[in-house]
Amino acid sequence: MINQAQINQILSPINQFLHCETPDEWVYEAKKPENLKIILIDHLLCELKAGQSAMFLIRKYAVDADSAATLLDWFKPYEDFAYRKIGNLDSLKGKSNISKSIMAKSNSPYSQELIDKMVLLIKEELHHFYQVLEIMTDRGIDYHTIPAGRYAKGLLSHMTTYEPNTLIDKLIVGAYIEARSCERFAKLAPHMDDDIAKFYISLLRSEARHYQDYLTLAEQIAGHDISERVRFLGQVEADLISTIDDDFKFHSGIPSAD
């Protein structure tokens, strides 16, 4: 397990990137034992959605038709479990790795770079999905579907509607979601049971790298300074985190008093 100095080193660029810190009110609500179930179920779904977002990016922008079909097949067991309640911990074991190669489109200028980073991200997110499900199973927490919160939708609602700016915005949004996840794992870890705390701390390196990969890809694809756009979407993200939110979730804002 990494020590506090290493944690601080990981979090330093994250905290500089994010425009606000997670409010204490959210941490207070999240550490309540009665909210562990919603935190774990929402975390489980966040891992799937993070993987899906990466998959949709490379399917749309970077891969040939056969590879696009392979990516859909890769996700099917996880989507069957999450959306159709088909499968279990045993049936998902070892499914996070992909055996077939993912081939780039011949006419895409950024295919291979996008593929390499996103395929690694997908493998890690799907493995994390399995790890969260293990924790839930150990605690006798049954999975059930829950509606998505406002966070990701609120960010995506500000995306530009023409290419390549849409892709650049999607990558910037991905960077903020991964950075916030990293920051929240660090906030939650001290208040969790040892096994969950160790798991959350173990996620910090990958989440921090995911944020950097998204941001690097956005800068490379843009080919020009995107700092103004990054700042704008960062403020949108901060507003979602620091304002009252009626729906308590892993990425929600300040819990309402009701």
Image (cartoon, rainbow, N blue to C red):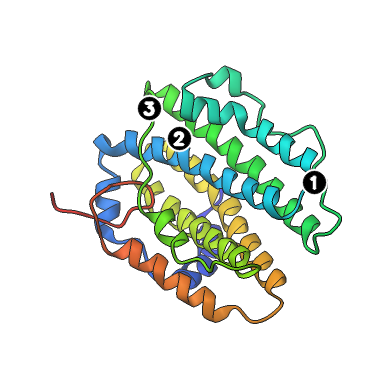
Residue wearing tag 1 = 64
Dot 3 alpha-carbon crowd within 10 angstroms: few under 14, some 14 to 19, many 20 or more: few
Residue at 56 percent across and 66 percent down: it is 169
Mark 1 vs 2, N-terminal side: 1
Horizontal side of residue 191 vs 126, given as left or right:
left
Quick check: 197 above or below 179? above
In the displayed structure, 210 sits above or below 96; it is: below
Q: Secondary structure at mark 2?
A: helix
Q: Position of residue 192 (x, y in %)?
A: 36, 41
Which residue is located at x 42 percent, y 27 percent?
136
Q: Tag 3, which secondary structure?
A: loop
Q: Viewer-nearest of labels 1 and 3?
A: 1
Residue positioned 48% across, 30% down in the render: 82
For disc 2, the marked residue is: 195
Give the label on residue 144, or none: 3
Could you tell me if the residues under marks 3 and 2 are in contact, i.e. CB atoms within 8 Å? Answer: no
Q: Amino acid at mark 1?
A: Asp
